[in-house]
Structures are given as C-alpha cells and as structure tokens.
Image: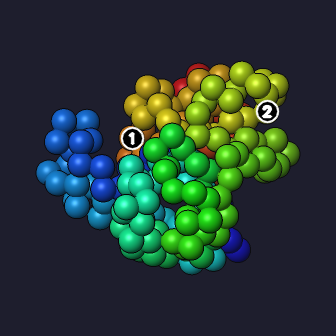
Amino acid sequence: MSETYVTSDLHLGHAMLVHRGLRDFKTVDQMDRTILRNINDRVGNSDTLFILGDFSLAGPEKRKFIERMAGKIKCEKKILIVGNHDRLNPMMYIECGFYQVCTHFEAVYAGHKVWMVHDPAWAELVPRRELVLCGHVHGLFRTCENVYNVGVDVNDFKPVNVYDAINTLSNNGGNG
C-alpha cells in the first residue's frame, strides 16, 4: 500500500546554510546527500512525496542541478508546492522530474481537511478545524495550533508521514 509523505525547505545546493552554521554539516554536498538518503530511506517508489517549497535555491541557470537532484529521489510521484526560493517556471519542474507543481494542495486524510502550503500564513485563511502542513519557517516551530511544520530543520532532515502529522495535531491540539 502506498503512503504519503511531506517535507519542506530542502534547499539543496544552498551553501550559505552550511557556511553560516545554520545547518550542522561540514559541506553542502554532505547536507544534500543526507537529505536525499533520508528521503529514499523512508519514501518508497510507489509512495507520494509532497515537497512544500524551497526544493533548491537554484534558478533557471541551474536547471540541470535541479533535474539531477530530483532524479535522485526514488519515488515516482514527487509533487512540488512552490516556495519563495523555487525559481523555475512550473513546466520546467515537470521536465525535471516532478509529477505535479502547485501553489497549494487540498486533500482529506483520516477525515481531516488538510492544506499543504509553503508559508504558514495560509493558516489565517482556513478554519481552525482544518489542518495546515507547511514549511518556510525552518526552526521557528514544529506545531502551532492547527499548523505542522514539515520542514527538514525540525524533523531530523527526514520526511514526515502525512498521518503522523495529522495525529500529532489531532492529539495535542497543535501545542507540541
């Protein structure tokens, strides 16, 4: 049975995060390899992976880099919710190996309406009974009310199973 996973803020190839000590890696290559290995260790070929923005800081001049990094993720259904650092036009991401590219995604999981977005500010636009999975804020918080930050910085650089995120929000009211 296929599973659904979410992650955000991979920032593959973004050397500043390492050089300024914002992520505890010796090199950007080590960071990239760790994130990609963690994804592939958890997400199977038939699973779906939502990347809620900031796949890489690279723009059109680095398209081959984005294509190479996307190709290293084993699962066939990679869905990108564009973030503020995703600089290619949506069709270029499709050509680089993404299954779908959106500004947001809505779905129902375990009876909960779930919004997948990059920026948690979207939570202000949805009823509190609906859940928001986001990134963008790096280490600022993991959960807050009806919002779960799936970013790699607060999840040990690993993707999160969508049902685990929903259970966390449902069981603790988002105050964990």
**Percent position of residue 135, x then y:** 53, 39
Q: Provide the secondary structure element on which disc 2 rests.
A: loop
Which quadrant of the view contains residue 116?
Answer: top right
Viewer-nearest residue: 14 or 157: 14
Which image quarter is the N terminus in? bottom right
The numbered dot on residue 130 is 2
Mark 1: amino acid: Asp
Residue 125 in percent (x, y) is at: 76, 25
| Horizontal relation, residue 77 to residue 70: left or right | right
* Disc 1, SS: helix
Crowdedness of circle 1 by 10 Å Cα count: few (<14), some, many (20+)? many
Point 54% across, 44% down: residue: 83
Q: Earlier in the sequence, mark 1 or mark 2?
A: 2
How much space separates mark 1 and mark 2, taking CA atoms? 24 Å
For disc 1, the marked residue is 153
At x 58%, y 48%, the residue is 82
